[in-house]
Image (spheres, grey):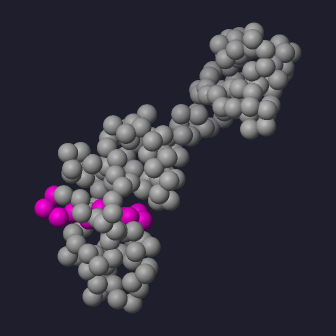
């Protein structure tokens, strides 16, 4: 999934000549924690709520240019969400400006990425269950598990794999909807699957 699919495009931008009091008011009204700073259409900085807190008591007489960060880290709409998340972790930041041809096209935040993660896993859909299966045997495949779930009238909403942190075995997680999720889980166990966890 790409940043362009998840970024916010309704971006409030300010200029270096605006005052911090203006920025604070816009951020409170909009419910966001950072604003891009533009000049003549070009991104020149980013201002965060932390920058504003460092100038409390002087907001009405301090211009954004005195508080903004100019050493920018940016992404494009074609950047993957995984890469954007890695950049945020590396730089310990909660959001990134998204640029197209040097112009601000949107903002992507940790909240946007977390929501995408939940959507991909099917966790945004109510009334679902999740099971984690350790794929220990050759005959125990994701495709076979999906077939068993379908035979039990289950509807798969999300599938993924990861390595178990202890023994590094491949683990498949399946988010599904079924009238009787416990029956689905028990059937997988009867078929020899090692059910690492079940959240029904």
Which of the pair 187/2 is nearer the observer?
Answer: 2
In the rendered image, which quarter is residue 50 located in? bottom left
Tell me how many marks there are: 0
In the rendered image, which quarter is residue 200 located in? top right
Q: Which residues are magenta?
A: 30-41
Left or right of 90 on screen, residue 148: right
Q: Can the viewer see residue 182 in this picture?
A: no
Left or right of 74 on screen, residue 156: right
Residue placed at 82% from the left, 23% from the top?
194
Which of the pair 15/167 is nearer the observer?
Answer: 167
Q: Is residue 79 above or below residue 161?
A: below
x and y percent of residue 179 in the render?
A: 72, 24
Q: Can the viewer see residue 164 in this picture?
A: yes
Left or right of 37 on screen, residue 81: right
Residue placed at 75% from the left, 11% from the top?
138
x and y percent of residue 101 in the render?
A: 20, 45
Q: The N terminus is located in which quarter?
A: top left
Residue placed at 32% from the left, 49% from the top?
98
Which of the pair 84/19 is nearer the observer?
Answer: 84
x and y percent of residue 67 in the render?
A: 33, 76
């Amino acid at each position: 999934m790409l940043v362009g699919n998840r970024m916010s495009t309704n971006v409030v931008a300010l200029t270096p000549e605006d005052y911090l009091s203006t920025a604070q008011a816009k951020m409170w009204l909009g419910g966001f924690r950072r604003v891009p700073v533009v000049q003549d259409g070009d991104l020149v900085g980013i201002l965060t709520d932390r920058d504003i807190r460092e100038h409390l008591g002087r907001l009405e007489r301090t211009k954004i240019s005195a508080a903004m960060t100019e050493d920018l880290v940016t992404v494009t709409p074609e950047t993957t969400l995984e890469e954007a998340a890695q950049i945020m972790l590396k730089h310990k930041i909660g959001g990134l400006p998204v640029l197209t041809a040097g112009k601000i096209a949107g903002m992507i935040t940790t909240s946007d990425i977390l929501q995408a993660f939940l959507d991909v896993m099917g966790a945004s859909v109510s009334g679902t269950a999740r099971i984690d299966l350790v794929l220990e045997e050759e005959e125990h495949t994701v495709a076979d598990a999906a077939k068993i779930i379908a035979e039990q009238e289950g509807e798969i909403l999300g599938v993924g794999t990861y390595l178990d942190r202890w023994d590094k075995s491949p683990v498949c997680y399946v988010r599904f909807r079924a009238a009787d999720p416990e029956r689905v889980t028990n059937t997988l166990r009867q078929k020899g699957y090692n059910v690492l966890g079940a959240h029904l």
